[in-house]
Structures are given as structure tokens and as C-alpha cells.
Amino acid sequence: MSPLTHPFFSFPIHEHTKDQYYRLGQEQTELAIRDQEQRYREQGSEMPEHAREFFRWRGEKPPWYHNDVVGFLDVGMDGFNSMTADVFFRRKHFPRGASQRFWPVLPIGQQRFLYCFAIQRRKVTDLNDNAAYVEACKAVLELARRDIKAHRKRFELCQLPFNLECFNFALAYQQIKGR
């Protein structure tokens, strides 16, 4: 199963980039407005502005960060001084013949993110040096981006909202192992 035993953090995997997500929503809204305008013209009248505004309001996409998620990447240590990551996707994003697609179905209200694959390990050369953790983490994230794109070309690993140097991996790993 998963080599990850000491997770540090999780990053969302999105189906689209932020710009693509909102552009797609805008295109869908404009298409709906054009369709309604055509119906009004067929009835011999002009589409009122309040109706146009209603479709613009109705077509607004919910926030991208939380609503375009197709999976997650968990990053951490494997217990053997190597950094690794696990990839989880929603059931519908597995290949057609994958056994995960046939696992028992849970009630609709429960989101199901199932383990898909692990990212190749990267050795942390010095467990007391944060720079060694940062180097290994950057390598794992780069491999994760590549492997996620290989799984589905349009999927995007969320860009980090911080520099990895901000995180004290050495201290965090010592605390996790001390539990």
C-alpha cells in the first residue's frame, strides 16, 4: 500500500488551473445567455436585462480552491529517512479497469478519495539539516507533478502558497517520531 508513515502536509490536486476554471464557467454562462436570447427572439421579444443578470448570477462558479479538487497529494516521511508522497483521487478519476472503481459505494454525502499511487522516495541526506529535507521535498514535488500529469494531462498540483524553507522539517520530523 502506502510507504508514507509520517505525513507533513497535503496539497490539493485540481482538474483545471484557476484561470481555466473561471474561463470555463464564463463560457458556459455566455452560452446559456445566448441560448435564452435566441428563445426570446423566437417569441418576438427582447431578453430583459434582469433575466440576463439572473443568468450571470446563476452561472457564477463557486470558489476554485475548494470546488475543483479531484484529489490530494500527501507529503511526508516513510520512516526510513526518505521523503515520499501518496496520491489520492476520487473514484471517478481512476482508469476504467482499475479495481478501485469496483470498491463498495458509500453514501453520496461522503467524499471518497482513494489511494492511487506513491511517488518515488527521495533520501534525506542529513536528518538534522533542514536544507536536506527541503531538497528532498522539492524533488518529490517535481516527481509528483510529472506523475500526476502522466495519470491525467489536465490535472494540476496546487502551487505552494509558501516557500518550503519556511517549514522546519527537521523539528517536525523529530516531534512526529517522538509521539
Image: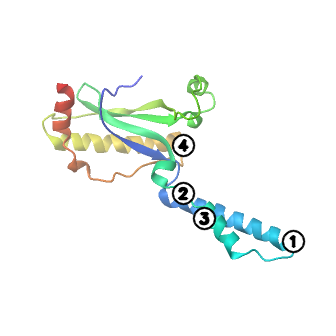
**Residue 58 spot, x, y in % from top left:** 62, 61
Q: Secondary structure at mark 4?
A: loop
**Mark-to-mark CA distance, 2 and 4:** 16 Å
The answer to which of marks 1 and 4 sits earlier in the sequence is: 1
**Labelled disc at residue 21:** 2
Q: Secondary structure at mark 3?
A: helix
Q: Are marks 2 and 3 in contact (CB under 8 Å)?
A: no
The answer to which of marks 2 and 4 sits earlier in the sequence is: 2
In the rendered image, the residue lying farthest to the right is: 43
**Labelled disc at residue 43:** 1
Question: Callout 3: few (<14), some (14-19), or many (20+) C-alpha neighbours within 10 Å?
Answer: few
The answer to which of marks 3 and 1 sits earlier in the sequence is: 1
Query: Vertical placement of 7 versus 43: above or below?
Result: above
Q: Is residue 64 left or right of residue 161?
A: right
Q: Quadrant of the N terminus?
A: top left
Q: Secondary structure at mark 2?
A: helix
Which residue is labeled 3 in the image?
A: 57
Q: Are marks 2 and 1 in contact (CB under 8 Å)?
A: no
Query: Vertical placement of 110 versus 134: above or below?
Result: above
Kindly identify the residue that appears in the image at 39 percent across and 25 percent down. 2
